[in-house]
Amino acid sequence: MTSIESLSRLVEPNRVHRRLYVDPAIFDLEIDRIFGRAWIYVGHESQLSNAGDYVTAVVGRQPIIVARHLDGSIQALYNRCAHRGASLVASSSGNVRFFRCCYHGWTFRTDGELLSIPLRRGYDGTPADTRNPAFSMRKVARVESYRGFLFVNLAAEGPDLRTFLGGIATSLDDMVDRAPARRIAIIGRPFRILQRSNWKLFFENLNDAMHALSTHESSVDAARLALSRLNDRGSPATTYASGGIAAIEKNGISYSTWDKTTTTVFERGHSFMGGFSNPASYEHSYVDALAARCGVDEMRRTLSVNRHNSIIYPSCALRAAYQQLRVIRPLAVDRTLIEIHNFQLLGAGASSDRLAMSFSNLVNAPSSIVMADDIEAFNRVQEGLETEGSDWISLDRNYGRDRTESDHITGVATSELPMRNQMRAWLEYVTGGD
């Protein structure tokens, strides 16, 4: 059963039922009530620089097109021809003068308006007409941008994007403010990784400091060995590799150090964990460019923001210091597609891009030894949850020790506070809240 009462019994303050991860009926409900009502990340304005530029995405199970129209506006459209229903666009991105259906040649402007119909006289006397809005592409209910990050909402009602983001908007600010030009741009195409596990497991892992020492033990050992063999970590020959390797090695910091790091959670499932970047480690050319643009005091304030993973529930997570954003696409109750996008800090120079690409290639690429650790753990959790060994999943760590502030709750990084927060949001969505 999936009544509100039965769903409420599956989530308790400090534990959740395994059905949330293995029941296809609950997954279908999530697609409808979470991904059909939340703001979902679909792209970045840097991908839509010119009129006719477009990107495609899937929101829940709905394929959409996000395009820059001739008047400069951003349009979000369902990827479906209004004639016989064929999808109009097969590529993930591109530039067009208009969208043309491959089946019968109907064309549509980049705002979705029907442009032309071949042999139009065949429709004389029927409702099919370029002036009839019923034969235009259907628009997604809402599309909004925050600091260049594009989100859509399939529901016409509900909070606007800024309200939805709440306090986690500061993590998007952090990412953009690190660019001397105060603008960022996506670099190239994303990595894509198909995981054989429920989408919620990925989010739960992001701000789970307790998993790093055990799950990533072998990759930490490999990173320490590699770093010991680098004679001069600051030389041009080793800078590219050492940046990513050093990030891998930080997974090996002690539990006591993690316990001194803070995790902050907000309404609607959002959260961030304090990071371990060393502001003094940034390359001088980048620091000088940022200081020249905004002043020394503002440069120091910007680089003092230290966050590891920031979660914008339920669709994406970012690491501002490494110029990276990961998009989570649920495919089935036990299948999840992860897309990893890299960003360029405009005005920062090549050194900044090298650090971002080093981190991405060594930590989050499909061939990364770090990503392999996590995927193996996710697979084993999914397999275990399919069994009848126990019906409940514990979220007890540091339960009752969280500190409630005016608009957020904080705890130590070793707490399972972020998971409890996500489950509160999950329950609000599936039982009818915003």
Image: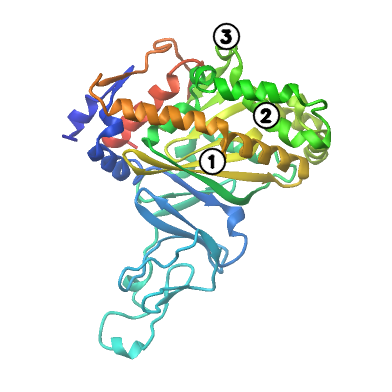
Task: Say which residue label 2 marks.
Answer: 245
Secondary structure, mark 3, is: helix
Please tell me whether residue 426 is drawn above or below residue 209 in the rendered image.
below
In the image, is 414 to the left or to the right of 188?
Answer: left
Q: Where does label 1 land, which residue?
A: 366
Residue 307, position in %: x, y?
60, 27
Q: Amino acid at mark 3?
A: Ser
Q: Which residue occupies the foreground of this view, 161 or 203?
A: 203
Q: Nearer the viewer, mark 3 or mark 2?
A: 2
| Residue at 32% from the left image edge and 68% from the top image edge | 85
417 or 298, nearer to the observer: 417
Which of the two discs, 3 and 1, labels the residue nearer the N terminus?
A: 3
Quadrant containing the C terminus is top left
The amino acid on which the numbered mark 2 sits, given as a three-letter code, is Ile
Residue 214 at least partly seen: yes
- Disc 3 to disc 1, how far (Cα)? 31 Å
Residue drawn at (34%, 30%) of the image? 382
Compare marks 1 and 2 and give the one earlier in the sequence.
2
Indicate which disc residue 256 carries.
3
Distance (Cα) linking label 3 and label 2: 22 Å
Horizontal and vertical percent for residue 163? 46, 38
Q: Position of residue 194 (x, y in %)?
A: 44, 43
Q: Amino acid at mark 1?
A: Pro
The residues tagged by marks 1 and 2 sit, at their Cα atoms, a distance apart of: 16 Å
Q: Residue at x 81, y 36 (%)?
A: 237
Q: Label 1 crowding class (10 Å Cα cut-off): few <14, some 14-19, many 20+? A: some
Residue visible at 50% across and 25% down in the picture: 207
CA neighbours of label 3 inside 10 A, class few (<14), some (14 to 19), many (20+): few
